[in-house]
Amino acid sequence: MSSQSPKRDPLETPAAIKAHAVREGFPRGFDDTQIWVFDLDNTLYPAECNLFAQVDQRMGAFIAKELGIPFAQARHLQKAYYRQFGTTLSGLMQVHKLSPEPFLHYVHDIDLTCVPELPELRAAIGKLPGRKLIFTNGSRRHAERVAGKLGVLEEFEDICSIETCDFVPKPEAEAFDRMVKRHGVSPENAAMFEDMPHNLEAPHVLGMTTVLVHSDCYDHPVRSKIKGWSQPPEHVHHITDDLIAFLKTIKLT
Ligand SMILES: [Mg+2]
């Protein structure tokens, strides 16, 4: 397990990103929400767990072994494919015709010791009326392991994993289209919870209510852009830095 800690910069969190902030004048609430869709990584568990640091290292190791190249070169390819194709896996599939399953199995074979049991989160999700889904760019096995460790797995009717979406990842609109079709989701009656702001653009366009689960744990360049916001962009309807507290504040009818 990596001991690398994510970069934290809590003092620079802008005023617009305070807990439970809602875009001024934005009327969209949860009165019509019947389907609750949650991202998994850094959304259902605290970003401070930094699980991605382990996945990140294992991606490099997998690429080095599969392609027979030095680790440093593998890491360079890993990041280049992420930038060019949206995910490292997409690049490996398109450029090297690699099968996705061995990659997913290897990179998600990580130590979950830091993932806490969250009975309060389970209770808060359990009280939400209607259907609940996990929608992740990770594998189904990874989602089952992590949600199982959190103690929330039983609250979800299903997992829309990267396999479910035929390896088309968020933030691509195609991934959301597939999720909506596969799981019979009516976007105007659905809410999407995510830690990555750009993953809320497509659900906003579809008509879903969007919630950014924010953390001071800036371990991704996209999330670090949040520090530059004077106010949240149009596709971010709600922001919280405490998912459990936020779910408790939702007025249920
Ligand atoms: Mg995430």
Image (tube, rainbow, N blue to C red):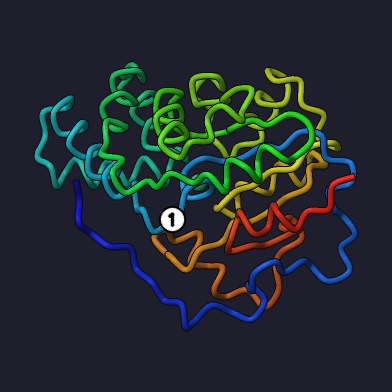
Q: Quick check: 131 above or below 170?
A: above
* Mark 1, secondary structure of its residue: helix
- Residue name at image x 60 percent, y 48 percent: 194
| Left or right: residue 237 compared with residue 196 | right
Residue plotted at (77% across, 26% down)? 185
| Crowd around label 1: few <14 · some 14–19 · many ≥20 (10 Å) | many
In the figure, is residue 84 to the left or right of 208?
left
**Residue 61's quadrant in the figure?**
top left
State the residue in front, 4 or 56.
4
Q: Is mark 1 within 8 Å of ligand 1?
A: no
Name the one closer to the observer, 119 or 71. 119
| Residue 238 point in image, percent of width and height | 73, 59
Q: Is residue 37 left or right of residue 189?
A: left
For the residue pair 68 and 49, the one nearer the viewer reads as: 49
Q: Residue at x 43, y 65 (%)?
A: 218
Q: Is residue 57 left or right of residue 13?
A: left
Residue 78, given in percent of the width and then of the height, sits at 29, 41
Amino acid of disc 1? Ala
User: On the image, numbered disc 1 is attached to which residue?
Assistant: 47
Q: Is residue 246 above or below residue 158?
A: below
